[in-house]
Amino acid sequence: MMDDPGRTQPAPTFDADYYAHGCGRPYVRDDVWLAFFGRVADRIVADLAPRTSMDVGCAMGFLVEALRERGVDARGIDLSEYAIQQAHPDVAPFVAVASAADPLPGRYDVVTCIEVLEHMPPDAADRAIDAMTAAADNILFSSSPTDHVEPTHVNVQPPEAWAAAFARRGFYRDADFDATFLTPWAARFRKVDGPLVGVVAAYERRLWQLADANHQLREANAALRVVAADIERILADRDAELSTLRQVAAERDTARAATVAVRRDLDALRSTRTVRWSAAVGRWVGRWVARRRGH
């Protein structure tokens, strides 16, 4: 998180306000940031096993601190005096105010540069790559390829632009190394002396893996589309059946309501005086007819 003092336009100030509001969430010594850099340090130690390291753009030294806790002789530089002053007292002797565009002091097993070069104008970023590649054969690198909104991002480049810049120095992406524990676009660049047969083979291997995975995903997607279409047809049939059942239920409810109404009307009719008299007359006539037949 640094810039170069020799840029032609006013340099952004990486001060308390920047670290409070310019990093997505406040960049302070808290459990979230310490846990993140702890995980990064775990992967660096497990995958690269460095004895020495330099973090270019170390900000408050969280990664330096995490690596030193894991036995690595880690050091860091950052242009921001404010950030360096926030380093933990145990780390303070191993971090310093300096520009990424200047030569690094010494050589290291690995140099890390995390979200730094997008803050630097192209000429300064180019000098920073010179400095890093002169100081180590392993570079763990990350630079946002899309965030053009952040005001201090003056040099946002796609990953291939950075890969080309490193290739001009004889450094090539390690296609077998998964650096996404850092950011989705992070990469490990390694110095390659001699023929590039191994580099080409690794790139082809990775390209084939991605192409095969893409092909399998496309086939799986096509199969899922067929299944989804079958399910849609089944659901449509079920909806039609439910619609018929609802219609039958509605007709049944209507018939029940009509039956209740008729019974209510009959009950009311039976309770009238005329109906009771007619019923009594009917019973008398019935008995009279029965007596007559008996004679």
Image (tube, rainbow, N blue to C red):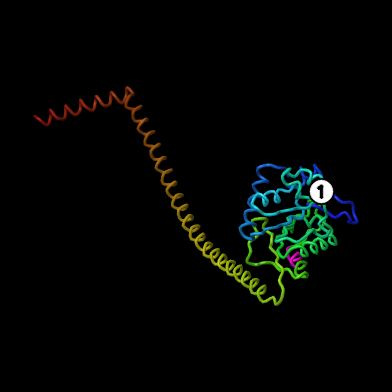
Q: Is residue 69 magenta?
A: no
* Side of 205 where 164 appears, left or right: right
Viewer-closest of 100 and 110: 110
The amino acid marked with disc number 1 is: Ser
The magenta stretch is: 159-163
**Label 1's element?**
loop
Residue at figure coordinates x 80%, y 42% from the top left: 16
Image position, residue 234 (x, y; %): 46, 57
Image quadrant occupied by the C terminus: top left
Q: Residue at x 85, y 49 (%)?
A: 12
Note whether 229 is above or below 208 in the view shown: above
Q: Left or right: where does residue 21 sit relative to residue 288?
A: right
Can you give x and y, in whole percent of width and height, for residue 227 in the image?
49, 61
The answer to which quarter of the image holds residue 82 is top right
In depth, the one of 37 and 134 nearer the eye is 134
Residue 86 is at least partly visible in this image: yes
Q: Looking at this view, is 289 or 14 the one in front?
A: 14
Residue at the image position 87 percent from the left and 51 percent from the top = 11
Helix, strand or loop for the magenta stretch, by majority: helix
Choose between 25 and 41: the one closer to the eye: 41
* Residue 34 place in picture, x, y as percent: 67, 46
* Residue 130 position (above or below residue 252): below
| Residue 220 percent coordinates (x, y) | 53, 64
Q: Circle 1 sits on which residue? A: 80
The answer to whether residue 149 is seen in the rendering is no
Where 21 sits versus 223, above or below? above
Q: How many marks?
A: 1
Q: Give the residue at x 70% y 63%.
A: 138
- The part of the image, by quadrant, that contains residue 46 is bottom right
Farthest residue to the top: give it.
273
